Amino acid sequence: MDRIEEVELLPKGNKTENMRMTRRELLAGLLAAPTLAEARSRLSVPKDLRTPYKLERFVIGPSHQPGSFDEKSADVPFVFRHQGVFYMTYVGFDGVGYQTGLASSRDLQNWRREGVILKRNPASPVIRYNVALTWILRENNVFGPGELKKVRGRYLGLYNAEPGSGYEQGPGVIGLCWSRDLRNWEVEPPCLRPEDGAAWEHAGLYKACILEENGRYHIFYNAKNRPVHWHEQTGIATSRDLKTWVRDPHNPILRNGPPGSDDEYFASDPCVLKYRKEWPIFYYGLGPKFIARDLLALSPNLVTVRKCAGVLIDVGPKGSIDSMFAHKPSIISHAGVLYHFYCAVSKEFGRGISVARSRPWKT
């Protein structure tokens, strides 16, 4: 589930078109990018949020089994703890569209596939071709157990779906879904549509996460501004009743950086948790070298955002599983160790899910 291969950046040799695009983007939103001086004044990544030690292999990769939902790729991890076991929802691609599977683990290193839990529905105009479960409501603390929270006796999830067959075809929408057992999900109609938002999100919505704080629900989501030559940024919508959602007037709250920055083109796939008195926003950026890497921003109030300097998960050397992209974060803590799951992409190994952590792996 990755649009990076599809995005077409403007050719550097076309100075006239580059100038025209730059003016248009600046006029579309003067707040869209910080100055270079602001970028240089970014915070340092807190030491206890750093995860420099990679496992260097897939924990869930393409199954390569003809006809399976994850035959061609595994993507978009969401890791949590439930009844003493670790689970991961992930998105599989079979060449037609996306569906969502479940995997389980006792040690966050070795995972067993549990099968599909959210399938596309040919009778539905929304999830006819694909449906990606991207988040389930969980307790907020980044160093907490990562347990799920129920709402009126059920688990609450978020899904993303595009209207066409194939690889992210058409403008995506976001909706709520519900389950009593984590294996059977009831899908609601979309609660966020691109046409209802501002210009920065008119071409489609992507991955979202949801959290609850003091009775208010927050959906963080990223979106793109146009079908080609696009930028992606992250915004927020809130609700008290899970029915009426209001987009924040400060959107997008996580904006693209200045030219040359790690998130010049994409500031995407938010993973928002609580850390002391702040809210870390783990996300990935796409910069001028066409490399996707996981980054970090901090917010004191879920609206005001300040980015941290440096890269959380960098791409690996040629021949490694993440030589092209290391992105789409999911964070969980266990036994004093912070684990950072991400989607790793390379030409040699394809697209799968790997993990890094705050302490070295035992050999």
Image (tube, rainbow, N blue to C red):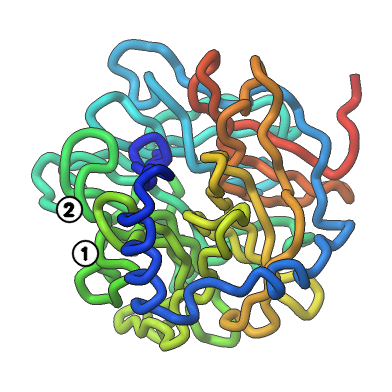
Q: Could you say where residue 13 lies in the image, as x and y percent from the top left?
A: 40, 43
Q: Residue at position x 57%, y 52% from top?
A: 285
Drawn side of residue 183 relative to residue 113, left or right: left
Q: Residue at x 38, y 11 (%)?
A: 65
- In the picture, residue 340 is in which quadrant? top right
Q: What amino acid is labelled 2 in the image?
A: Val
User: At which x and y percent is residue 230?
Assistant: 34, 55
- What crowding class fits label 2: few (fewer than 14 Cα within 10 Å), some (14-19), or many (20 or more)? many
| Rendered view: 185 above or below 355 | below
Left or right for 338, reference 8: right
From what the image shows, is residue 96 above or below residue 206? above
From the image, which quarter does the N terminus lie in? top left
Q: Is residue 82 visible?
A: no
Q: Residue at x 42, y 59 (%)?
A: 232
Inter-mark Cα distance, 1 to 2: 8 Å
Three-letter amino acid code of the residue under disc 1: Pro
Q: How many marks?
A: 2
Residue occupied by mark 1: 189
The reply to whether callout 1 and callout 2 are in contact (CB within 8 Å) is yes
Q: Which residue is at the front of the view, 356 or 306?
A: 306
The C terminus sits in image quarter:
top right
Residue matched to label 2: 126
Q: Position of residue 343 (x, y in %)?
A: 56, 36
Q: Position of residue 35 (x, y in %)?
A: 62, 74
